[in-house]
Amino acid sequence: MKSSKVNYKPKDAEKRKAIKPVICYPIESLKPPPMQDYFNARKSLKKIDQIIIPPRDAKCFKVPKGHFFRIYCENGPQVGDLNLWCHNNLDEKFYSGKTRALYGTHLSTKDRLWSCFPYLRPMATITHDTLGWYGYDSDGGSVHDVIGTRCDPYTEKTLSNKEYHFCCHSNLIRALSNYKNISYEKAEKYVHDVLNVFMCTGFTKDTHQYFMKASPVRVGDYIEFFSEIDLIAGLSACPGGDCSTSHSSDDAICHPLRVEIYKCPRDNLNNWKEPKISEYSGKHNR
C-alpha cells in the first residue's frame, strides 16, 4: 500500500539539501578557442560594413566566417536581442539553452555561442566585452544573458490582453522575412531564444523569478564576436529600452543600436579552423 504522506519532510532533510552540487557539463575537455589568434587579429581589423538597428525594430545582416562583428550602444542605454543562423541553412540556429548549460547564465569574453542539434558546433566566439567589469551584482544580476527568451506578442496577450507588434520576437520575424524573402509564417519557425545583449538580468532571491534592471551600458560600449561560420545575424533593438521599467510597450525610451563588421588578414588566424558539425553518428541506438 502506498503511503499518503507524499510531501512529508524526511528526518534527513537537511543532510539531503547539504549535498554538494556537481557541474553537469564540465567544459575542460572542449578544445579551447584560439583566443591569441583572435587577439592578434583584432590589431589589424578593417571595417567593411555598418548597420543601424532602429529603435523597436530589427535587421538581419551577413557576417562571413573569419570576420568580426560588434554591437555598439549608439545614442543611449539600449538592450538588444540577438539571433544567429548558419547562412546557408536556417535549420542550424543558435542554441541558447545548451550555451547556458556550458558557460552559465550570462556570457562574456572567451564564451562561445553554440548551434542546435544535430549540428552542435560553435557559431561565434565573444572576443571583447566592454561590460566585462560588471560581473555579478548584489541582486545576482549580470549582463548578456542566455536565460530570457525574448519579449513576444503571445506572452503579452496572455498577461495584458493587449496586442503589441514590436516585441523582439515579431521584430526578428519581420527582419528575417525581409532578408530571406520568405513569409512571416515561415520566418517565425526559425526565430529562436536569444542572447540578450547589454540586458542586466537574474533571478530574484525570494521567488527565483526572472528579473531585469537598468542596463549599465554606456554610449560607446560594445560586445564583439568572431564569426566561426558564415552567419546570418538578426538583432532587435528591444522595445524595453534599457529595461529599467517595462518592455513590450511604447512607454520606454528606446535608442538605435549600431553594428559594425570587420575583416582581418587570414594570416593572423593561423590556428583557426571552421568548426565541424557534431560527429555523433545519429543512430540513437537504431
Image (cartoon, grey):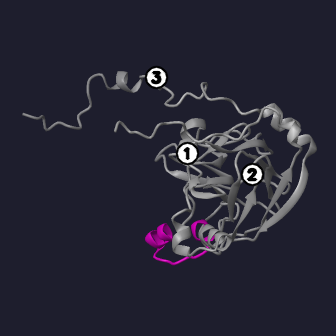
Image quadrant occupied by the C terminus: top left
Left or right of 12 on screen, residue 130: right
Badge 1 marks a residue whose secondary structure is: loop
Could you tell which of marks 1 and 3 lies nearer the N-terminus?
3
Q: Residue at x 57, y 66 (%)?
A: 169
Residue 10's label in the rendered image is none
> Residue drawn 59% across and 73% down?
182
The Cα atoms of the two marked residues, 3 and 2, are separated by 33 Å
Quadrant of the rendered structure where residue 18 is? top left
Which tag, 2 or 1, sits closer to the chain's start? 1
The answer to whether 185 is drawn above or below residue 212 in the figure is: below
Give the CA separation, mark 1 to mark 3.
33 Å
| Residue 99 x %, y % | 58, 42
Query: Residue 229 at x, y = what percent?
Result: 70, 48
Left or right: 234 as drawn, with respect to 46: left
Q: Which residues are magenta?
A: 153-171
Label 3 SS? loop
Could you tell me residue 270's position as x and y percent? 82, 33
**Disc 3 designates what residue?**
20
The residue pinned by badge 1 equals 119
How many residues crowd mark 2 within 10 Å: few (<14), some (14–19), many (20+)? some
